Every structure is written in C-alpha cells, then in structure tokens.
Image (spheres, grey):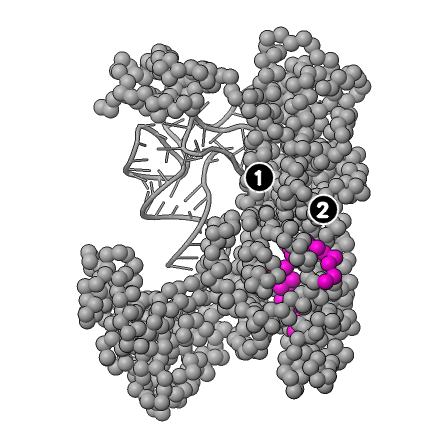
Amino acid sequence: MTSETPTRTRPERYDPSSFEQKWRERWEADQLYVARDDDPRPKKYDLTMYPYPSGDLHIGHWYAMTGPDIVARMHRMQGFNVMFPMGFDGFGLPAENAAIDRGIHPAKWTVANIDNMRRQMRLMGASFDWTREVVTCDPDYYRWQQWLFIRLYQAGLAYKAMGAVDWCPKDKVVLAREQVEGADRRCWRCGTPVEKRDLEQWWFRITNYSDELLDFSSVDYPEPIKAMQTNWIGRSEGAEIDFPTEIDVAEPIRVFTTRPDTIFGATFMVLAPEHPLVSVLTTDEHKADVDAYVARARRETEIERLSTDREKTGVFIGAHAVNPMTQERIPIWIADYVLPGYGTGAIMAVPAHDERDYEFARKFDLPIRYVVAPTSGELPDDAAFVGHSADEVLIDSGEFTGMPAAEAIGAITRALEDRHLGQFAVTYRQRDWVAGRQRYWGAPIPIVYCDEHGAQPVPDDQLPVVLPTDVDFAPTGVSPLQSHAEFLHTTCPVCGGPARRETDTMDTFVDSSWYFLRYCSPNYEDGPWDPAKAAEWMPIDLYGGGAEHAVMHLLYFRFFTKALRDLGMVTVDEPTLKLRNQGQVLGADHNRMSKSRGNVQAPDELVERYGADTVRAFLMFIGPWDQGGPWNPTGIEGVHRWLGRVWGAAQPGSAPVPADAEGRELLRALRRLAHVTIGEVTDDYEGMRFNTAIAHLMELTNALVREREAGMAGTDAYAEAVDILLRLLAPVAPHVAEELWERRGKPYSIHAQSWPEADPALTAAETIELPVQVDGKLRDRLVVTPDTSAAEIERMALDSEHVQRYLAGRAPMRVIQIPGKLVNIVTPRD
RNA sequence: GGGCGAGUGGCGGAACGGCAGACGCGCCGGCCUUAGGAGCCGGUGUCGCAAGACGUGCGAGUUCGAAUCUCGCCUCGCCCACCA
C-alpha cells in the first residue's frame, strides 16, 4: 500500500541519460547477473551466439541479443538459476587480413576490437554474466581445443587424408563445403569463386553422425533449420548394383541408384571421368578421346560450374557392361555430370526415367526404353517420365512386369541380392568436414610429424601449442607458420628425434563447436570443462542466433556434442533443447543495412539520443523477432513516448478520492486488465513474441494514464497495476523499470523480484460481449454474464431487432452457440 | 529444377477455425501555448450523407462460420542445386 503525500512540484520528465549509466554500474558491482554454480534452484542456460569481434557492435547484434536477454531476465525473476554468458569468437580471417592490409598484428586488432565491443555491449544493459567470458584466441581456451582435437584424433574422428577440396584463391585457404555458397560457388567470407584442389587435409568424420543428425525428435528447432540440415545431409535410400564388364581383369562397375525398379531400362552406363575403372576399361581405339575428355574435365571443372550452359558432354570409352537383369550389352560412357564424390561415382543410365540421362541419350543418340508407366494416362512424348505417384507399374520388365513400381524397388533389389549382384544401400550428400586452414590466426593443430613415427599428437603436458606472434602474414597458400623455423622444428614425442609441427590451424567453427561447454566452468584447469559443472548446466535451454549458420555452426555444434558424448565427456545428446533464429533488421529503405547504401543505424548514437531502454524496446517492437523488419526512424519516437508515459503513470498520485459506483467499476477494470496482462506478457516472452508483449504493456500503460486522468492514481488498485507493469517491463526496459521501482520506494533490485502472478479470480470476466451472427455475418452484440443460460442467450439473440431484420420473418434453421464466444443464426438456404 | 517461408489499411504489424485491422507510426480535427518539430484529447480499412455494402494476392473447395484448413495458380524472400 502506498500513501505518498502528493508533492505538487514540477513533474520530472523521463530522462534516461540521468540514470541508465548509474544502474548498469550498480548491477555490475553487485554481480546481479552472475550465475552461481551449485544453486539449488532449477537452472536455465540461456544463450545467444557469441559475436565475431569485427570491432563494432551493430544494430543487428542488439536485435539478436536483446531477445534472449529478455527471456533470461524473466527466467531469473521466475526463480530460475540463470546462466546467460557472453564471449568472443576471437580467431578468424578478418584479423589476419587487417594485419596484411594495415600492418596491425591480428592479436592486437582482435583485443582492441573486443575491448570496444565489451564497452558497447555494456551499453545495451543486457544481463550477461561477464565473469564467465570466453575468448577463443586465448591460449587458455585453445589449449583445451587442442586437447579435444587429440581426443578426436585418437578416436578416429579427426584424420588426415587426400581429398578434392574447395579452395578460395583470394584468401588462399581451403573451405569446408558448408562454407561455399550459391550456384556460382563463392567463398562465404570474401565472395570469390572457389576452385577445386586435391590436397592432403585434416577432416572431422561428421558423416559418422549423418543419421543421428537427421533426428530432431528431442529438440525444438525452427522448421527451416531442420529442413536445411536435412537437405544438406541428403540421405538417399536405394541400391548398389554391380554391372559386370566384358574385361576379365576388371572388377564390375558398382552403381548407386534410388530407382532399382527401372533397371530394365538401363541402356548405358556413365562413369565420372575421375572413376578409377576408366583407365582399365578404355579401349585403345578410344584412349585418345577419353584422355582428352578426362584432362578437360579436370581442367575445366571450375569454368563448367560457373557456366549456366548445362549442355551434356561425354565420350564413349569403347567398352561394354552387362545389364544384370536383361543380360544386354550396354555401352560405357564417361561424362562430367556424374560426380566422383557422390554414390559410387558411376550410374546406370535410365534415360526413359531420368531427365539428365534422357538429355544425354538424346544428344548422343542412345536407346531410350520405358519400363515404368502410369496405370492411367500416357507416357510423355518427348521427355523422361520420372513421376513417383502410387499408380505406376512396371512394363517390359521380365517377371516384374505389371508390378507396382513402389513394390518393385524392394523386389528387384532382393532379386539382385540373391544373385550377389546388389544390395540395399544408403548414400548421403554430406561429406566430412574439412577442419584445417592454411592460415595463421587460428588454433594450431597439435600434431607433429616424425620421419620415423609419422603423425604424433602433441603430449598433453606440452599443450597449448602456442601460436607464435612474430610471423610473416603475407598469404602464400601455405600457412605462415611454415616460414617460422622456431615453431616448425620440434622433436618427436616418441623418439625425441627431429620432427616438424603441423602448420595448419583449425577452422574457426571448431572454436564455436564447444564454447558453450567452456562457459560452464570457464576457469577450469584440469580439462576443457568440469564434468560436474557441465552436467549441472547442460543442455542449453534456449539458444538464439542467426539462421545463416544452419548448415555450418548449427550442424557442427550438434556433431561435436554427439562425438564428445561418445567419448564419454558429456552426458547430453544435443547441445540445445530449443533454438530460435532472429530475423534481420533492415534499413529504413527495406534493404539490408550496408555502408555503401548509407542506411546503417549505429546503436551508440541512438543510445545517446533515446537511451538504451528505448532502443531495446523499439527493436523488439519492430515486428516478430524471428522475422525482423525495416528500421523506422519515426517509430522509435513512438516507443520513446510510450516509456515517457510509463514514467508519468508511475509518479505518485494524489490522495484517493472516495470512489463512486463508476469509480469502483473503473478500478475493477484496471485490476482485471493488469492481471490479464500478466498472463499475456508471460506467454509472449516465453514464445519470443516480444512485439505483442510490448503492445500489451502499452495497453496497460494507456489504461493507467486514463485512470490517472479520472483521479484514481492514489488508489491501491492503481499502485498494484503500476507494480505489475514495472515488473513486466523490467526485462525489456531494465533501466527505467529499476529507476521507477526505486522511486516508488520498493526494494532493490526490481530484477531480483519475483515475477508477478495472475489472480484467476480477477482475470475472469464479469460480463461478456457476445457477437451475434446471421449466416456468419456480424449483425449485433449481446452483453451477458458468464452464467447466462444458452436458452436465454438464444432468446436474446433472436429478439434482437438487427437479427429480426436479417431473418426477414423466416424461422432460423439452426442456432450455433460457442459458449463465451459467439452466437451464429443459420437461415434456410434458398 | 527441388525444399522451406511469406503475401492483411498510407506504413510496421495484430488476430487458439468464431467481432479482421490489437499496438505503434503517419495523417486529420481540437485543447494548451507568444510559438510548436513539445504535451494532452478525439478521429482515421474502402465506398456511401446515411441505412448499409464491400473488404486479408488470384480461383475453387471444406465448414453454420475461413486471413487462418485443403487443392490449383500468381508474386516475393531464403536455402539447395547435373546428388543418380
């Protein structure tokens, strides 16, 4: 109960600059947001993706981080022991490029950027627990990453092998397949078209987990992310089938197909130009042509890929294979539309039922034989018939003729299995993750090479393998570490003889594949994390971040978690239970913010003008958080005005006047609204619908302003509603909520108060306004109480003069009542 | 070509199959001001003086009732793309 004496001094205006800084300093000094280990309360691990220290926190960071901050703040007030940590993704190419372009050492550049971004992040008033900060380029961090790498290496999950890899000619570095973007295959960092190179590389065996990564049953992920990861993994079920060749010394050609039902229509074979059997099978007569084609395919891969012209090319190699079902001799071709890295690198071509094979057959005049037909309708005149509908049957397919195609897939595969010519098989598009980078600014791969003992992991007691600081950064295509003699030359851990260090560094996505585990015990010195603490905090309860990481970070961190589980190091199957992606804040012109367009909003100057609370609230009000939206320069004024109204509404009221009936009704309505708002805002925050949460807070504010106008500001009901409003507002606008809370004489801190709870007795409506429809169109409204009987409501509805007019004397055919919702009167149809 | 998502006032956007347009911006009118690019109050989907009619990209369907569900189109965005 509040009973302030009305002080009729000039009311103070809402001026965030007079208190925001003060509160941020006090919260930090009081360690208000520091998560405690071994707290008996239930935990929440809320997380937002740590940023790359590019040097400047932009409005998109604010947008991404404020959402999870609101949820974390609510969770804290709801009595959870909340961990909401922050860190920096310290390694990466931009630091190295800055070194090359401007002569600043990557370490210096990175540290300076981190300092600036820490300062900017503190301006947000986000409730980060800075005591758990993790910086990945810190040797105390990457030491344990190297330790983990060795564990993965020993388990066979990290390995070195030759492989065709994507190579960025500008950054002079290999890229993982996930880091090559678009139809024209460009580097994810710099946009340069990539090349294919055969190089010996470090890989992570992520494909061991392809099947498990397809299983999302235990996690709550956005549908688009699940779809993207599923497509990326690209699981295909089918069969591997052996096609014998006529050359005795050669093994049969093994193909992968998803359509074994069409095998009777396989009229030729196609091998990838790189296929190992090509040199064995090619006849002397065709050798010159084949060699020329193979050489051209290797040389022109890249140009081929960039061209939009998809004309099929290929050459006959002079040899034949035997179709194991028809016993027919069929010619063997090579063509670059068959890829060496997918399936078996060879196909049985069924031109009647595959568009690519069809195109190829037309161009080179090869036979086309239809073996599947729709039971209704006709085969296409001039196209492959690839349909997958239920009503297809085999034709011209020996003993399988007439069998439904769906059934024939299994039947034919089993028949081949019986003859040891094939078996069921599953193929994935996903490849292993190329883990090494030929660049300086990353965690060194902790392997040494001895002439005698080969590749050997660096012993644990010699970790970390520290990145030397005095190196030449000019990118040459090999790691700058190769020219650093002191780093390069070392001794073999087995024999003590001379050895060389691995000079590749790890992909930065390795750093982000386990940082969330390090947060659980950031200073732990006996391992990457304290198993007890990881068990306490993991899994993450809410993870927020950008959808652009769908097949990179968000796939890798799932893989790492599963691999570490299999190594007995964590107990969870998935890193996060719930993932949510924020949308993009666009410029006022609806375009992506970019310096060249001149539509970038710098958060610092906005904070100076409006205060952090207004910027936070406005960003959350723009639209649905997962959708983003355009920056509206006048919209932010509206949100600022709203917080000014909150300020006014929370000022002390004059002594209550004895309420008349009308006044009592006003107060009842206010209490109801306040308690209804609790439920709505709580649900909206938990569902990350911040825009509608703020709309509800605005409605409550508007109601308070009206009540104040009506002279109710000194009442208990009014004070209760203000206290509810401030606590609901605290997650969005933490500073002004704290300031007003204190001014109202409430105990510090509002952020440590308990979350308000709605009183069901108050939220229940006393009267209900019931829409009355005639044939689904709104014609009138009834005001009833919750206990008005259905019969009474029906009588009232039919009595309505508006309803009477539309009934026009006809008797209603039906009256439909949805209790508490509406009445619909159905008239007879003409 | 394949997958996913989205089309609602002048604008951003609300609406468990049940009152379309919450909330905010903008605009219009008023109050207060020497003044207003401050503040406050009221109005604001379209057509119509009104009663009313019409309205959620287009076309069908399901339903007593559809922005919402189904099918087919159109447009835009994102992801993948010669993946057998």
* Residues at discs 1 and 2 in contact (Cβ within 8 Å): no
Residue bearing the label numbered 2: A36
Three-letter residue code for mark 2:
Arg
Q: Residue tagged by mark 1?
A: A686
Locate residue A429: give its quadrant: bottom left
In this image, A762 relative to A12: left or right?
Answer: left
Image quarter for residue A569?
Answer: bottom right
What element does badge 2 sit on?
loop
**What range is drawn magenta here?**
A503-526
Quadrant in the picture for the N terminus of chain A: top right
The residue lying at 36 percent from left, 87 percent from top is: A250
- Queried whether the magenta region covers residue A277, the answer comes back as no
Residue A371 location (% of width, % of height):
23, 67
Q: Nearer the viewer, mark 1 or mark 2?
A: 2
Q: Position of residue B38 (x, y in %)?
A: 70, 27
Q: In the rendered view, tell whether residue B76 sits above or below residue A246.
A: above
Residue A256 in view, yes or no: yes
- Residue A196 or A229: which is nearer the viewer? A229
Q: Could you tell me if residue A708 is visible in this image? A: no
From mark 1 to mark 2, how far is it between C-alphas?
23 Å
Considering only vertical position in the picture, is A311 above or below A328?
above
For label 2, count other residues whose C-alpha is less than 10 Å away and answer few (under 14), some (14-19) or many (20+).
few
What residue is drawn where x is 63% and y is 26%? A701
- Per the image, label 1 sits on a secondary structure element best described as helix
Q: Is residue A357 left or right of residue A555?
A: left
Instruction: Residue A194: give x, y in percent of width and height.
Output: 55, 70
Residue type pointed to by label 1? Glu
